[in-house]
Image (tube, rainbow, N blue to C red):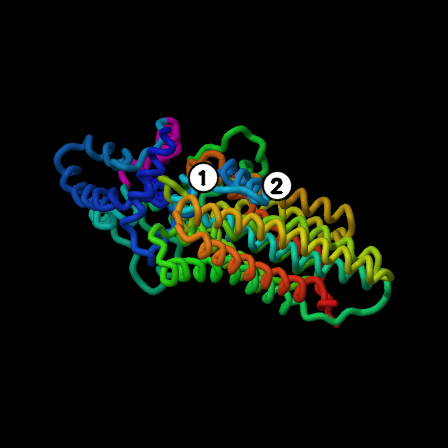
Amino acid sequence: MSQQHTMAQYSAFNDSFSPFSLHFYRKYFQLNTIDFFSQCAAAFNPIGKLSDAQMNSTGDLYGPVWITATIVWCLFFSNTLSDILNVYMTGKDINQNYTGLLLRAINLLYGYILLVPLLFIAVTRFVYKIPQIICYSRLVSIYGYANVIWGPASLFAVLRAVFPGHPKLSMILKWFVILLGGVFSGLNISSKLYHYLNDVAFVEDQKSSLLLISGVIFLHLCFTIIVKIVFFGELQ
Amino acid sequence: MSFYQQPQQFGQYNPASLPQQQSYSAEQPFQQKQTPYHVSQSHSPAPGFQIPAAQSQQQQQQQPPPFQSFPSGSMDFNNVSGSIGDQKLSQGFLAAFSTSGYPGEPPLLEELGINFKHIKEKTAAVLNPRRGNISADIMTDSDLAGPILFCLAFATFLLLSGKTHFGYIYGVALFGTICQHILFKLMSQDASIDLIRTASVIGYCLLPLVLLSAVAVFVPLDNLPGYVAAILAILWCTTSASGFIVSVLRLQNVRMLIAYPLAMFYSVFALMAIFVEKTQ
């Protein structure tokens, strides 16, 4: 109770700062460990919804920043470790530019969670003219937390190095990992956004909300395919 | 006195109380002329700085007698020249090479804000992370002498084991400290933290990794026991650093969130200590 009171005070206090000061961004980092892990757990649920209070609040940026950093690390680590194991088992040398891989991972993941929400906001605002606009930081938060499944999925993909002589088995494993990551995170994002469009923003036209959601799913599909190409070998 | 109070000013920095402090010290010479009792009053902390009673008592005991009549420090600069103006410094060219100074002048290390007792206390606190709750007071003296000492020791140990990583160490330390400082500032609620304090905490908690690098001089750590030792050292650093930061920021239930970036930061240093650069 008192916690909520102080939080309200802080948000009122923070509103007086300009976006160019550090204090302005403080409201996006006011969370505790329990909040963080419950949101991470909720991101594993493919048909999860956000409560109305959560939907209307600003959402935190700690999760998107550090979860995405962790996933970048996991993808990179999975790649380099499986390459090392591969070299160790087959004796063939792999020549890959790992700095470039790391930079691509950073650009792809941070770019996805920052630009796609911006696009979503722009489309809902200027094309569909939906009056109640979800907060941009909340959208970034939804996208950032939904990607948490990629962490365990990419670490699981290290196993592909264990059977270097079986390209088919390796391919099946890669596609399994991609499906696991892509489907879980995609379903999580689209169910949350569908809930937002129908129950919070009250989009009357069923067709337009379905169109928006299919756009979101299409973008996520593109993202998943790029992850597959960049981190899990060429498309077979 | 001023030596002990300066860190307090750094630590509990409060924009509202700073003008008060200045006006307070401006009034001091006048008060001293009126009654001698105000001299002792001037030693009590200014409004806005809460020093625990036990600590201030300890300070009173630690003061050598000449200090009582020697109000020094950056704030009371006019006062200093006033009280000792009648005692001349020795003149001449040779005096520049002599060690004579003003009578009752504090030693150079104290003037510079380097207090070995505090450094020792904080080092002990870092090495003992399981000790219940770490008091916020121990980190109010945010000196950088200890961290610089540890960074230098770390770099020297790496140098002795054949790795010249001075540039990496300073670069990573500076960049990491600034980034984490921004994060801590964002996560803080009502307590504020300044960059010096963050650097001090992070630097002091590097100590377990310094020990690891000292071991690495004699024993190669690029093997399984070495990895285990490095992970333990990272956990040790992270536990104490996050404990300090949480107590400084007076936060609850965020220790894990603060510990995660710290663990990343310290693991970079651990990687430097373990792996040898391949030069071909």
Which kind of residue does numbered mark 2 sit on? Trp
Quadrant in which the C terminus of chain A is drawn: bottom right
Q: Which element carries disc 1, helix, strand or loop? A: loop
The span shown in magenta is B54-70
Q: Judge whether B190 appears above or below B272 on screen.
A: above
Residue B30's image quarter?
top left
Say which mark, if any, is on residue B236: 2
As measured in the structure, the alpha-carbon distance from the residue carrying label 2 to the one carrying label 1 is 39 Å
Q: Is residue A109 left or right of residue B64?
A: right
| Residue B149, x across and y down, in percent | 54, 51
| Residue B102, x across and y down, in percent | 31, 49
Magenta residue check for B128:
no
Residue B14's image quarter?
top left
| Residue B252, x across and y down, in percent | 46, 34
The residue pinned by badge 1 equals: A51
Say which mark, if any, is on residue B230: none
Q: Judge whether B272 appears above or below B210 on screen.
A: below
Looking at the image, which residue is at 47% across and 57% down?
A: A212
Q: Which element carries disc 2, helix, strand or loop? A: helix
Please rate how many residues cluster around mark 1, counting C-alpha atoms within 10 Å: few if below 14, some from 14 to 19, many from 20: few
Which kind of residue does numbered mark 1 sit on? Ser
The chain letter under disc 2 is B
For the residue pair A154 and B148, the one nearer the viewer reads as A154
Looking at the image, which residue is at 76% across and 51% down?
A: B219
Looking at the image, which residue is at 31% across and 47% down?
A: A14
Q: Judge whether B203 appears above or below B125 on screen.
A: below
Q: Is residue B39 left or right of residue B222?
A: left
For the residue pair A226 and B225, the one nearer the viewer reads as A226
The chain letter under disc 1 is A
Residue B275's image quarter?
bottom right
Q: Judge whether B91 appears above or below A61 on screen.
A: below
